[in-house]
Amino acid sequence: MSAAKRHRQQLEVVLHLDPALPWFRGHFAVQPLLPGVAQIDWVMHYASILAPGWRFVSLKNVKFQSPLLPGAVITLSLEWQETRQQLSFSYQRHDGDVRHVASSGKIALCR
């Protein structure tokens, strides 16, 4: 993790995708990319900051739009809506000062 910003029920985490991460091994040989299961795992890890004590129930509207590659700098944005028991997330790739959405979705949580 490079940096994190929290504002009420929102969290932004800037991450550097180290090519040595085990997630990249074997996924895939020609062009490694960060698997969707890793992305969801990280969402749930950081969700514990916004929604301590809440657990995963289901995925909703998850879209993997572009690959997250080794060496990339990305931002994970989370928004917790307790009244809806819903966590929204998006991963954005950095291209200079511009961000491009790479994946996004919603996760239902319960106590």
Image (cartoon, helix red, strand yellow):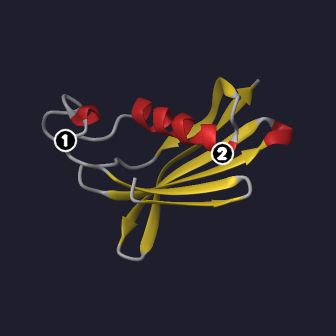
Residue marked by disc 2? 88
In depth, the one of 18 and 26 nearer the eye is: 18
Give the quadrant of residue 84.
Answer: top right
Real-space Cα separation, disc 2 to disc 1, in angstroms: 28 Å
- Determine whether, in the image, residue 11 is placed left or right of residue 53: left
Residue marked by disc 1? 20
| Three-letter residue code for mark 2 | Ser
Is label 2 in a helix, a strand or a loop?
strand
Q: Give the residue at x 72% y 46%.
A: 80
| Three-letter residue code for mark 1 | Ala
**Badge 1: residue crowd in 10 Å (few <14, some 14–19, many ≥20):** few
Residue 70 x %, y %: 24, 49
Q: N-terminal of the two: label 2 or label 1?
A: 1
**Badge 2: residue crowd in 10 Å (few <14, some 14–19, many ≥20):** many
Q: Give the residue at x 30% y 50%.
A: 17
Is label 1 in a helix, a strand or a loop?
loop
Residue 42 x %, y %: 47, 38
Looking at the image, is mark 2 or mark 1 nearer the viewer?
1
- Determine whether, in the image, residue 32 is placed left or right of residue 62: left
Residue 48 x %, y %: 62, 37
